Amino acid sequence: MIFLQLFLAHILTDFVFQTSKGVKQKQKKKAKSIFLYLHAFLAGFLSYLLLRDWDQIFVPIVISVTHYVIDLWKLNQKKDNLKYFLLDQLLHIIIIIIVWLYLSSSFEQIGPGFIQLLDSNPFLSVLIAYLLIIFPVGFIIGKATEKWHDEILNNTKEPLSLKAAGRYIGIFERILVLTFILTDNFSAIGFLIAAKSILRFADKNEASARKQTEYVLIGTLMSFSITIIIGLLVRHIAF
C-alpha cells in the first residue's frame, strides 16, 4: 500500500499535473525555473498527502529534494531522448522504493529475500527463459536467415525495413508468446500469429515482394517455434 501511494503521487506529479508549458520553462531556465521548484514541492506534498502519516515529515522533504536533483540532472543533459527519460524515471522509482522500505521497516528482508529468489527454481527458470528469448534467440534467428537477408538486400536498392525494427519486433513478439505460455493463454498466440499474417509488401517487383514475405514468415515461424519450446520446457521444469 505504501509503495502504491508513493508511486501514485509520482505519476500525478510527473504526468498528470505537469504541463507542456512548465516542461518548456524547465528546459529553458533549468535551475532558475520556478516551475522546477514547484514541481519538486508538488512531488513531496502529494506523497505526504496520500500517505496520511503526518508524523513522517521527512518523507515529503526527501521526495522533494531528490525529485529536484534528479530532474535538474536530466535537464542538464545535452539530449532529451528516451534514454534519459527512462533513467530519470528509474531514479525516481529507486527513491520511492528506498522510502517504502524504510517506512515498512523491510530493509533487513532484502538480503534473505534476494537469496530466496536465487534458490527459487520457478524464478530462475522464468528469468533464464526471458533472457534467452531476448538475447541469444534473436542472434540465432539472424544467423539462420542471414543468407536470405543478403539475397533480398542484393536485389533491392531500398532498405528492407526501419533500422533494427525487425529485431525489436522479434523481441516483443517472443516476450508476448512466452508470457502467453507461462500464463496458460495459448489461444492468444493464435491471435498474435493472425495479426502478424496481415503483413504485406507493396513492391512493383512481385518476385522481390514474395521473397520478402517468405523471409519474414521464416523468421517469424522460427521465432515462435523456439519460444514455444522454451516456454513449454519452463512450464515442465518450474511449475
Image: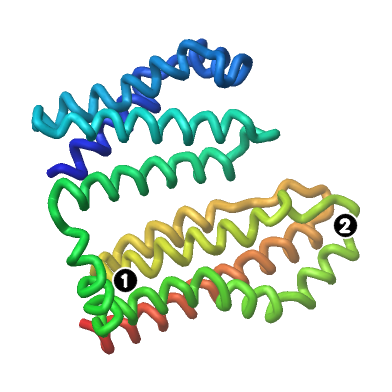
Q: In this view, does 159 lie to the left or right of 192?
A: right
Q: Are marks 2 and 1 in contact (CB under 8 Å)?
A: no
Q: In this view, does 72 lie to the left or right of 181?
A: right
- Give whichever of 173, 53 is nearer the camera: 53
Residue located at (27% from left, 81% from top)? 235
Where's residue 138, x and y in %? 59, 72
**Mark 2 and mark 1: Cα distance apart in space:** 38 Å
- Labelled disc at residue 195: none
Residue located at (42% from left, 58% from top)? 192
Q: Is residue 39 left or right of residue 82?
A: left
Q: In this view, does 12 lie above or below 206?
A: above
Where's residue 157, x and y in %? 90, 53
For label 2, the residue is: 156
For label 1, the residue is: 181
Bin the neighbour count of mark 1 within 10 Å (Cα to Cα): few under 14, some 14-19, many 20 and up.
many
- Give whichever of 62, 100 is nearer the camera: 62
Under mark 2, the amino acid is Thr
